Amino acid sequence: MTMSLPEEDLTCPVCCDIFTDPVLLSCSHSFCRSCLKRCWDTGLRECPVCRKRASKSSPPCNLALKNVCEALLQPICVVCQSSKLHKIHDCAPIEEAMLDCKDELALSLKSLQDKMNHLRTIQKASADMFEFIKSQALETQRLIKSQFEQLHQVLYQEESDRLAAVKKDEEEKISGMKKKIKELSAEVLSLIQTISVVQEQLKEDDMVLMKNFKDTQDRCKSTDPGSDDMSGLLIDVTKHLCNLKYAVWEKMLAHIDFTPVTLDPNTAHPCLILSENLTSFHYSKQPSYCPDNPERFHISAEVVAMTALGSGSHQWVVETGSNQDWLLGVVSLSVPRNAELSARPENGFWTLCSRDGEFRAMTSPPITLTLSRPPKQIKVQLDYNKGTVSFFDPAENTLIYAFIHTFTEPLLPYFYTQSSHPLRIMPEKVLVTMLHQ
């Protein structure tokens, strides 16, 4: 019977919706408690319908009406079934509606579980990366200390050599001074003896003096004064201190390597083993542990350098040696790291390939190259502004192949291998030039 109640008996005259917490006024009109409060907040405590003044400040709850409304709201809106205005609303039996709700909740549950699994995967990856960052920091600090220790050893050795040179200079100068002092002492003694002889002759009588005069005079003439030249006897301080720091730094250059390209270990595939100085690498069938970070190549054994090249001219030499399975060149900065792509210019690759004893320029399609002999080194030369990537045999300075392309984004030096024989980026000579004003 409640399902046949008219719409106006179940809707609030103020909000025109099904009653929520209905209250009953003394005039027998009912309203939602919140709706009546809003009306009364204006200052007039009267019925919004008949304008009769309310006798109570807190009208009682219309419990019967409340129960009917709550019961009807749970299975179906009564007006949706009976009112012409609500015919467009969907209605369904409770059993069907329950099944639909369960299906929707099951889908929502699966979505939430998928999100939970994804978050747990990210959480585990984050925890692993947290530990890796700590070990990475410790290893980097160890390598820094190792390289500084090498520099310290060079400085200590240079300091020792230079202190020894001063000591040697001191010993030589002191030895010279001792010899000089000894010679002067002998000359002084000889002169004292000669003076004594002359004094004795002056005391003799005339005949004896005349008789010994020639010998005495010859002895006086044979006594020459010692050399008073004291030049060159002091330590050459300038020789030891002149531009000391610069001279030591210039000498240290012989112990310092500079490579124009440095590999980025955060991009290396787990099967690539990089050297401590990040200038060489080789392939290993046993992958090392490293986090699954977005910068890393995940599909094939690739690695790129750390510095993006977006202008100017650059070159580097790679020693291939016994490695016969490699790709070298440059790639676009935006090349995907988690997808397998053909090394083609349309995919952002400009590379030279060695595989199965053949050399190919990785164009579309690849071009097989005929070389007089397999090069042991490959020089990669990039002129970004001119749009060229050239490959040379540095031993004969002959061009192997050159790509021509208009680059639209920065490029990274690129390397690939599946060989246990290493590829190594060759160091360059460091030249020091002085600018004289």
Image (spheres, rainbow, N blue to C red):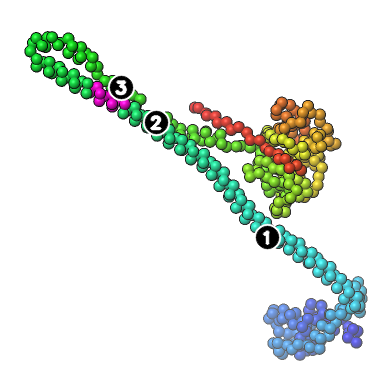
Residue hosting label 1: 127
Task: Report crowding for label 1: few under 14, some 14 to 19, many 20 or more residues within 10 A (C-alpha).
Answer: few
Q: Tell me residue 78's x, y (percent).
A: 88, 80
Residue 428 sits in which quadrant?
top right
Q: Give the range drawn in magenta.
A: 179-188
Q: Tell me residue 33's x, y (percent).
A: 74, 82
Whether residue 184 appears in magenta in the rendering, the answer is yes
Dots 2 and 1: beta carbons under 8 Å? Answer: no
Q: Given this view, does label 1 or label 3 mark the residue nearer the observer?
A: 3
Horizontally, is 156 left or right of 3 in the view? Answer: left
Residue plotted at (70% across, 53% down)? 289
Residue hosting label 2: 169
Q: Examine the rendering and report whether any part of residue 333 can be seen.
A: no
Dots 1 and 3: beta carbons under 8 Å? Answer: no
Amino acid at the residue labelled 3:
Asp
Give the CA distance from mark 2 to mark 1.
63 Å
Q: Tell me residue 182's x, y (percent).
A: 28, 26
Q: Given this view, does label 2 or label 1 mark the residue nearer the observer?
A: 2
